Amino acid sequence: MDIGIEKEDYKLTLDILKDLWAKTYNTDGKPDWSHILPYYDENIYFRDSIQEIHGLVDFVEMTKRLTERSSDLKMDLINVAQQESNFFIEWEMTIGFKKYPNSILYGASRLTINEKGKIIVQRDYYDLWGDIFDNIPYFKNRYRKFMHKKFG
């Protein structure tokens, strides 16, 4: 299936990654992945706290859903590093949903590139519910108390 991405040789480097990620989430509150998608392999495997995705077509659909659901989405890169074929990104994402206040999610991503220099695996790590509940006064204290009681 053609999703409109040219089949050129896009090889990811640390400097390119920083530049691309900074542009992706800071376009008037609506993210735009069009410039970074050519750096993803057609067989991308993506996983985060909510979903597991196989293939570029499904990954592109996921990015569209995120854009449609959020009224505002920004990401600040805190740290970016590379170790061999892995890139590590520590980030803070501010996300606003249509009827709810903005929430800040604190997370990290590990990107693995293949021999072509394209992203073949992306694994995002974050506490979705904890970061969202921290912005809801009633839930914040109850959720944190529950987590402390059950997990330490």
Image (tube, rainbow, N blue to C red):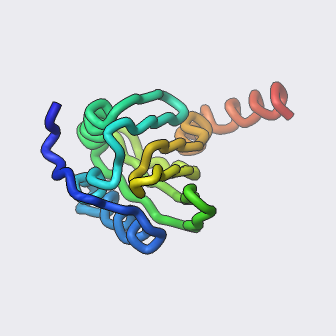
- In the rendered image, is residue 69 in sight? no
Q: Residue furthest bottom?
A: 15
Task: Measuring from the top left, give residue 91's x and y in whole percent.
Answer: 53, 58
Direction from residue 46 to residue 98 in the image, left or right? left
Q: Is residue 23 above or below residue 149?
A: below
The foreground one among 42 and 125 is 42
Direction from residue 50 to residue 68 in the image, left or right? left
The foreground one among 143 and 20 is 20
Task: Measuring from the top left, give residue 64's x and y in whole percent.
Answer: 25, 38
Task: Measuring from the top left, give residue 139's x and y in whole percent.
Answer: 61, 32
Q: Quadrant of residue 135?
A: top right
Q: Which quarter of the figure is the N terminus placed in?
A: top left
- In the rendered image, is residue 71 in sight? yes
The foreground one among 104 and 108 is 108
Q: Residue furthest front?
A: 115
Identify the residue at image location x=27%, y=59%.
9
Q: Quadrant of residue 126?
A: top right
Q: Which quarter of the figure is the C terminus placed in?
A: top right
Identify the residue at image location x=44%, y=68%.
13
Identify the residue at image location x=16%, y=39%.
3
Identify the residue at image location x=30%, y=56%.
36
Q: How many marks?
A: 0
Q: Is residue 15 above or below residue 116?
A: below
Direction from residue 147 to residue 124 in the image, left or right? left
Task: Measuring from the top left, give residue 27's x and y in whole percent.
Answer: 25, 62
